Image: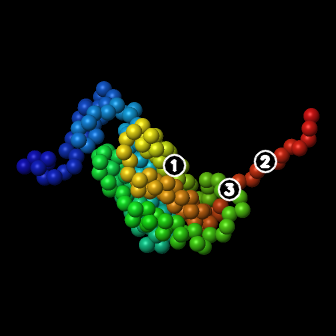
Amino acid sequence: MTEERKGYRLTKIYTRTGDKGTTRIAGGKELSKTAPRIEAIGTVDELNSWMGMLLHSLNKAGELSAEQYQQVFDIQHRLFDVGGELAMPGYQLIQMEHVKALEDLIDELNEPLPPLKNFTLPGGGESACHSHMVRTVSRRAERCVIRLKESGEDINTPLLIFLNRLSDVMYVLARHCARKNEGEVLWKASAVNESKP
């Protein structure tokens, strides 16, 4: 019995099919590796890698309850679904219930935080920094998906909303983690020189 028949997803790591700068998505459509859809898929993959770093640091630090950690862990799996949906035009894997789960986590983490009187900067500990990396890369992924949509491709609305809410989750999570470690890093405005020449 071949490995293909056993049901393994990957039987060969290199195929040489992308050596000329193209790749295929589900259904066999060939695209340039610089195509907007491939850019979006690649950015979501990068985002998921940062999620892995964040989960590693959260697991080490114990800054979340077991239930909260599981919620963040679930986000990583949904991000894989985001990539899958982008790779399979016409399919919908992300649902509004997934957006609602992010909103519930935002509310839970944000409730005990004091109101902000100034902007925060990335910092405050390892997990907080990783949260900010996920936040910023999720914003870039969102921009990639919007460009794909604006190019005329159909993008399911829940997927876009999910990426938008994800950056909000990560901002609140960064604040939560920073306050449990080194403290939030607040932006200090430059002194304004009011003297005139």
Going by the numbered disc 3, the residue's amino acid type is Phe
For label 3, the SS is loop
From the image, tell me which residue sits under label 2: 190
In the rendering, at what x and y percent does residue 188 appear? 75, 53
From the image, tell me which residue sits under label 1: 139
Going by the numbered disc 2, the residue's amino acid type is Ser
Q: Residues within 10 Å of mark 1 (few under 14, many from 20)?
A: some
From the image, tell me which residue sits under label 3: 119
Going by the numbered disc 1, the residue's amino acid type is Arg
Which callout, 2 or 3, points at the residue further toward the start of the chain? 3
Q: State whether residue 184 appears in this view.
A: yes
* Residue plotted at (29% across, 48% down): 90
55, above or below 145, in the image: below
* Residue plotted at (78% across, 47% down): 190
Q: Which mark is residue 195?
A: none
In the rendering, at what x and y percent does residue 42 appear? 39, 42
Distance from the alpha carbon under mark 2 to that under mark 3: 13 Å
